[in-house]
Image (cartoon, grey):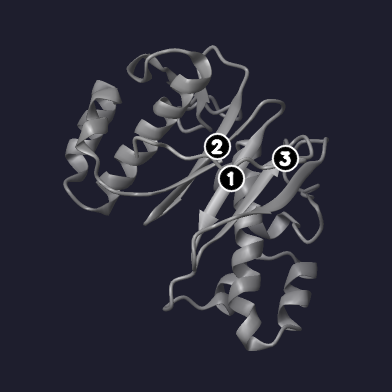
Amino acid sequence: MWTLPVRHRPEWLDVLTAAERARLDALGDGPAAATHLTSRAVQRLIGSGYLGVPPAEIRIGRRCEHCGAGHGRPRWTGSTLDYSVSHAREWLVMAVVGDGRVGVDIDRLDPGQNPTALAAHTLTAAEAHDFAALPAHRRPQAFLTAWTRKEAAMKLTGHGLAAPPSRIDVTGPTAHAPAVPAWPRDPVHLRPLPAPPGHTAALATTHPVTSIRPSGLPWA
């Protein structure tokens, strides 16, 4: 896994495709542009190390396996390695697995958000029962932990938010969603990830993860 700050790095522009550069130009100079540049460049820079191909030559497919549109989970074209990437404004995390599939999510709860109101729309009945039993000061972190686990699982399966979070139970070591169409029959394993202060991150994999190797980008 790689965790790095999101910021504008002009030296990474050369690894983007023409379409990605056009999208970057349209976003202007704000945080969305920095996130776009960081995410798209990192996927190619890290992919280059695995595939032995120059970063600018890495091809990334995003065809949705559920509907065929171009909004699916990213994949390195021609590779059997699976990866997932997530960002939360100031930080980006990317995870790569050698076997099976992976989903990763990082997030933080803004001070103005109401975790109790959010939980009412995103937790299963069992999760909501446990959440309501918590003292008020523990609810923000409890919600964020559940949310990142759900997001990681939905990224692994390729459902994204097309799968209602309130139908995905993440209270145990695996994600269960029997009412979600096309949810995998094999277990989706969950575990927490190290995250920067104030953030929470989660990992979902189709094979149990026995170790996590945090890595750095010396050029970042």
Q: Residue furthest front?
A: 218
Question: Residue at coordinates 51% horizontally, 15% vertically from top-left?
Answer: 51
Q: Reading the chain from its start, which is encountered first: label 1 or label 3? A: 1
Q: How crowded is mark 2: few (under 14 residues within 10 Å), some or many (20 or more)?
A: many
- The reply to whether dot 1 and dot 2 touch (C-beta < 8 Å) is yes
Q: Which mark is residue 84?
A: 2
Q: Where is residue 28 in the image (x, y as percent from the top left)?
A: 17, 46
Q: Where 129 sits versus 146, above or below? A: below
Residue 122 visible to an observer of this rendering: no
Which residue was labeled with disc 1? 104
Whole-percent x and y of residue 78? 54, 12
Say which label, 3 or 2, has the lower sequence index.
2
Q: Which mark is residue 166?
A: none
Q: Mark 3 points at which residue?
A: 181
Q: What residue type is labelled 2?
A: Ser
Which picture quadrant has residue 1? top right
User: In the figure, is residue 82 to the left or right of 205?
Assistant: left
Q: In which quarter of the image is the C terminus?
A: top left
Between 49 and 76, the one nearer to me in the picture? 49
Helix, strand or loop at mark 3: loop
Q: How far apart are marks 1 and 3 (CA)?
A: 21 Å
Kind of residue at disc 3: Pro
Q: Which of 139 and 63 is in front in this view?
A: 139
Q: Disc 3 and disc 2: Cα gap in Å?
A: 22 Å
Is label 2 in a helix, a strand or a loop?
A: strand
